[in-house]
């Protein structure tokens, strides 16, 4: 006889939080919980309130003092009362220290979508408002109540959309919010925000048991039980009936679009070790195993990157992989190489960090193509071989030769003729490698013009906004900060009608701040680029020099302005946020 589900205790919840690998092992001082008034978010809010009450001592909660509930009002019949107000339960009002209601304002410019598209559009608006709410409450972390059933649904939906193993592993317990997408862009706010999902390993019935055991009131959104409304709802209905019959039985007679998609992707489910003839518990275990494997692969890929950063430090915004190293990784574990390539794309891409576009839309075929090309020949400079290619994410791959020079140390030869000349003159050994960097913009394409005239933004921010600095995101890869406290000649720029512009320079597309007055050549006033803190720990002070191109050592001949800071902002992995 099946035992009734146990409620989640505060002590168990602390254990769940500890397994999320929080930064420095601590919750922040202020934490927000995204709440809908439903059982999942009500349970999560209650559990956070329980540990705040201090029943159990834990180092994890040492700084944790404030709890916010962020509730989005969709102004739809399902989530609002007859007056259009969000449905707030007594439990929500009692367990949150602060409640912030965030209204979606449907208008002519932002029309309320039809029922068919409502969930997709509302989700985008909901995330935008939650990020606004985090800014209002000064919270840098938001917790969502996604649970084990949600995790299975996410894994299935990603597999039928063509995701690779990383996507099939589902949601992460902790991750950056990310920059979003071009349609829903969050920029640096998203990069500075963490998303926490401590209940991913908890079943829905245990969440309901927790609500019942503690007399928590919640609302039920009836739209969640309409299988034809969204693919996720349809999948939820299928998984709910697993006790009656396994999915494999229904796939043999697929008659709905969702069942047909599942049936067409049976080989992918098998490849990822997800048995479609199993019950929900086994499915959850299979997805959890995929998630653990993903974490292990990411850790190994991060170690490879940091090791190369120490031994072969490339210029900012690039990666260098000796072919011999690539072959070693491939022989030891091809999945590690694929994960490394995927993280390289996200690291270097000009697409928003964390977006599907920054990782070739997570298509395993694109990653496989890159790996195959990189490993095709030990000498990529041989005649007839691919000299340069791009397989997605706006990242170019091109062969280079690494040589040792008595005067300049390690030099990178990017030109085929220079490589052949080095070999012909027998100057010394040469090591072949592949280099990856942001695709060089096409000068003839206006869409590739990355120059940003910041003159008016500087004047407006300094005069009207009364803030100490202006931050400008350049190419989704660099943050350029203008600090007015150290900028003592803004009046000169206004008086002399000068323009302050951020322009791209070098084939690696670095930012450079220049001043132009229309009569003289642009004057560079700042060229120095800072690294992320985690890279400074590993990267030696000296940089590699290039031969025959406009690359320079970042540690020499830089122009510095005391009121300007330029920083690379894209992390390689998730290790810097706790895993």
Image (spheres, rainbow, N blue to C red):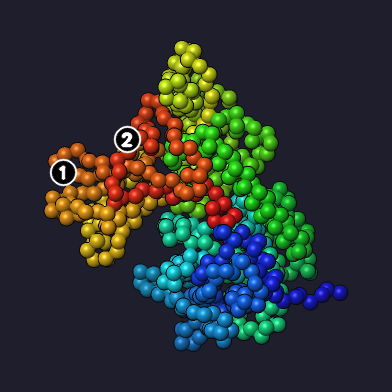
Circle 2 residue: 557
The quadrant holding residue 207 is bottom right
The residue that appears at 45% across and 21% down in the rendered structure is 405
Residue 424 image point, x, y percent: 47, 12
Q: How many marks?
A: 2
* Placement of 486 over or under 372, stated as above or below: below
Q: Which mark is residue 133?
A: none
- Please rate how many residues cluster around mark 2, counting C-alpha atoms within 10 Å: few if below 14, some from 14 to 19, many from 20: few
The residue that appears at 50% across and 53% down in the rendered structure is 354
Tell which of 221 and 249 is nearer to you. 221
The residue that appears at 52% across and 58% down in the rendered structure is 176
| Circle nearer the N terminus (2, 1) | 1
Circle 1 residue: 518
Residue 42 image point, x, y percent: 60, 78
Residue 328 image point, x, y percent: 64, 32
Tell which of 215 and 245 is nearer to you. 215
Tell which of 162 and 179 is nearer to you. 179
Inter-mark Cα distance, 2 to 1 = 26 Å
Nearer to us: label 2 or label 1: 2
């Amino acid at each position: 006889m099946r035992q009734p589900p146990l409620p989640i205790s505060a002590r168990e919840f602390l254990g769940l939080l500890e397994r999320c690998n929080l930064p420095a092992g601590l919750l922040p001082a202020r934490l927000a919980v995204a709440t809908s008034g439903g059982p999942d978010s009500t349970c999560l809010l209650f559990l956070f309130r329980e540990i705040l009450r201090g029943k159990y001592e834990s180092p994890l909660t040492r700084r944790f003092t404030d709890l916010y509930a962020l509730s989005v009002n969709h102004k739809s019949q399902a989530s609002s009362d007859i007056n259009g107000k969000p449905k707030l339960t007594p439990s929500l009002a009692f367990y949150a220290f602060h409640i912030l209601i965030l209204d979606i304002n449907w208008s002519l410019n932002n029309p309320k979508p039809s029922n068919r598209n409502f969930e997709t559009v509302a989700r985008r608006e909901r995330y935008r408002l939650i990020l606004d709410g985090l800014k209002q409450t000064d919270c840098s972390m938001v917790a969502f109540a996604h649970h084990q059933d949600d995790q299975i649904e996410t894994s299935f939906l990603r597999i039928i959309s063509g995701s690779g193993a990383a996507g099939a592993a589902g949601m992460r317990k902790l991750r950056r919010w990310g920059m979003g997408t071009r349609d829903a862009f969050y920029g640096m706010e998203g990069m500075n925000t963490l998303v926490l999902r401590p209940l991913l390993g908890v079943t829905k019935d245990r969440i309901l048991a927790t609500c019942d055991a503690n007399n928590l009131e919640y609302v039920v959104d009836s739209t969640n039980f309409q299988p034809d409304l969204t693919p996720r709802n349809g999948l939820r209905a299928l998984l709910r009936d697993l006790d009656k019959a396994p999915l494999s039985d229904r796939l043999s007679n697929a008659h709905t679009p969702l069942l047909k998609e599942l049936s067409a992707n049976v080989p992918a489910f098998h490849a990822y070790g997800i048995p479609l003839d199993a019950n929900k518990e086994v499915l959850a275990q299979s997805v959890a195993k995929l998630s653990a494997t993903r974490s292990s692969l990411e850790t190994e890929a991060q170690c490879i990157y940091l090791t190369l950063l120490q031994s072969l430090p490339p210029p900012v915004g690039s990666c260098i992989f000796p072919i011999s190293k690539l072959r070693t990784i491939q022989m030891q574990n091809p999945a590690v190489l694929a994960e490394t390539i995927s993280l390289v794309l996200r690291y270097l891409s000009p697409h928003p960090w964390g977006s599907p576009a920054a990782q070739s839309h997570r298509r395993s075929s694109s990653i496989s193509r890159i790996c195959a090309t990189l490993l095709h020949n030990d000498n990529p400079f041989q005649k007839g071989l691919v000299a340069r290619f791009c397989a997605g994410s706006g990242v170019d791959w091109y062969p280079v030769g690494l040589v040792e020079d008595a005067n300049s140390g390690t030099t990178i030869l990017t030109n085929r003729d220079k490589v052949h000349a080095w070999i012909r003159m027998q100057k010394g050994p040469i090591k072949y490698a592949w280099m990856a960097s942001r695709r060089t913009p096409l000068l003839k394409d206006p869409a590739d013009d990355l120059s940003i005239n910041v003159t008016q933004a500087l004047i407006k921010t300094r005069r009207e906004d009364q803030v100490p600095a202006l931050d400008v995101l350049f190419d989704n890869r660099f943050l350029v900060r203008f600090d007015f406290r150290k900028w003592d000649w803004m009046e000169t720029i206004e008086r002399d009608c000068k323009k302050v512009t951020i322009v791209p320079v070098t084939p690696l597309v670095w930012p450079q701040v220049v001043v132009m007055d229309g009569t003289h050549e642009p004057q560079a006033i700042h060229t120095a680029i800072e690294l992320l803190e985690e890279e400074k720990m590993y990267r030696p002070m000296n940089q590699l020099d290039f031969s025959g191109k406009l690359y320079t050592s970042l540690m020499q001949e830089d122009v510095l302005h005391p009121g300007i800071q330029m920083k690379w902002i894209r992390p390689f992995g998730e290790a810097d946020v706790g895993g």
